[in-house]
Image: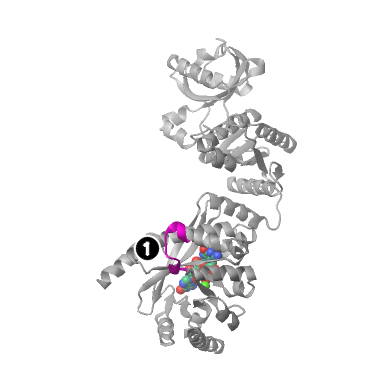
Amino acid sequence: MSSPTLDRVVDAVFRVDTKFDFKFVSESGQLWLNSVNSTTAAGNFLDLLHPDDINPFKSRVTDDPDSFACDVRIKKADGDCWVNIRGYQLPAANQYVICLIDISAWKADDGVHRYAAEHDELTGLPNRAFLKKLVDDLIKTAKHPFFVAMLDLDGFKKVNDTLGHSMGDAVLVETAKRLLKVMGPQDTLARLGGDEFVMVFCTHDAVVTKGLANDVLQAVARPYDTAPHSAYLGVSIGIAEYPTQGQTYSALLKNADTAMYQSKNAGKNRITIFSPTEDSEDFSIKSAIHKGIQEGEFFLVYQPQFDMNRKVIGAEALMRWTSRIFGTVGPDKFIPITEESGLMPFLGKWALRYACHQLKQFQQLMPEFVMSVNVSPVQFDCDDFDVMVLDAIVEAGVDPVKVVLEITESTLMQSQLKTQSALTTLREQGVRFSIDDFGTGFSSLAYLTSLPVSSIKIDKKFVTAIENEALACSTDKKLITAMISLAHSIDLKVLAEGVETEAQFAYLGASGCDYIQGYLLGKPISAQMVMALLESQMERTL
Ligand code: C2E
Ligand code: CA
Ligand code: CA
């Protein structure tokens, strides 16, 4: 019996006529039949089946001759064995193609659950878990190259958004059927989720693979009758070859993904073979950010801000990303790439909306709570930045006065008239602005008075210098006092960030600093932990 460790993708392929009489049995099919002690002598596929499974199987075929799938039992002298059947009609020949995988070991080994865990519910295709096992296994036994193709539909989001999810599902099922017809019996098609599919082509030949990928383009290009008005879709494909373009499952998938993203960037609906480039690491991070945004891999944590009596006054929302490909990636790495790739307005808007909704919840425990949100300079390049901010505030139902936008000195220095008018509009509505990393940029005092700024955040660099006796540091220390008195003289509040020690806290207090933020009193934490912190603060003040 074939082992369920997937040493072969498909155990047998048959072609039968409409009465299920055998017309063709693949070589592997013959071997498999021998191994289960069955023969095709009877001449009819139904003769192989357990009597109870014949009618269910036939009704699956009649229900959906274009793509049927089910699990049935095959009669054997020493007991039955389970197989998974997948098949489709060949209308021209009035025949069906039946592909069969032996799953008896899965069934025995709590198999039903295992099968479900390794298959996608919507399309019945293998899922990510199955794919990984399959590729790992192919790598172990590989004697020749094989190809991993990443497929991502173009225009699918529009189908989902305009025609609804059930229509989207129907399109995915139809896509799966079309793709199954393109591939050979030794190839595998898996669905990773959403509109993302992976095909593993077991051919040795790059030219053949490219030909198959071309067939995929053609198959998807046909109008989709499942959706009204015959929706048209495309597919962007990226291919990586084992072993030259990846020697592990994750390397192959990552490189195929990078190539797929290059197809998208080059105008979609095309095939790209992976070729390593210098910035390929960044490139694939970009594609991962793109997907991460859609798949909810980003989240916010909140670092509490305190007054000099150590009472919480608000928090700064800080973005975090747990990527399924790269693991945890810090904002210092992903924010610059997001900015450069043009995705920052989108991600920044998400952060602001999310933070405003969270603010609403925090205010149920502490109405005067203030939420600070970082704004990247590139967000100001959008025409409707002020509208976007006000929409987020109105949508969450919070008071604009309780929202502080943190912007850097360079944003202000380079600000155009457009930025300045957006800042003024927002300030008129009550939104406040704070200058982040104050003192590290090209500080100019002029803008502090001419623009609607409410506070400055003294950079951690100065705070760290407090306990350091070195000469340069003692200058930084003096600068803290100077910055605080300067800010106060023009009615700005001062928050010091990166406060890690009691000595720093004491020095800042003595210098007249208004608020502090730093590991000494609070690291960035989850929203639930902020709620707990506010509750304990309320209890203490009661
Ligand atoms: P930032 O705005 O200056 O944020 C303060 C950073 O200092 C945060 O790092 C915070 O975790 C860290 N920090 C706070 N207190 C201490 C301390 O006592 N000691 C030390 N060593 N570090 C402390 P994080 O979260 O890694 O963020 C880094 C930068 O990424 C932020 O610097 C900000 O420029 C950017 N960023 C984070 N979230 C967002 C966002 O939602 N939008 C934008 N545009 N940028 C963001
Ligand atoms: Ca900040
Ligand atoms: Ca800062």
Q: Position of residue 481 (x, y in %)?
A: 49, 87
Q: Residue at x 56, y 76 (%)?
A: 451
- For the record, the magenta segment spans 393-403
Q: Residue at x 63, y 53 (%)?
A: 284
In the foreground, 58 or 254: 58
Say left or right for 328 vs 412: left
Considering every residue shown, the one lying at the far top of the view is 42
Residue at which label 1 appears: 362
Q: Position of residue 193 (x, y in %)?
A: 53, 41
Q: Position of residue 358 (x, y in %)?
A: 42, 60
| Quadrant in which residue 518 is drawn | bottom left
Q: Residues within 10 Å of mark 1 (few under 14, many from 20)?
A: many
Asked if 353 appears above or below 262 in the picture, the reply is below
The amino acid at mark 1 is Phe
For label 1, the SS is helix
Q: Residue at x 44, y 69 (%)?
A: 401
Residue 398: say if magenta.
Answer: yes
State whether the magenta stretch is mostly helix, strand or loop.
helix
Marks counted in the figure total: 1
Say left or right for 382 vs 121: right
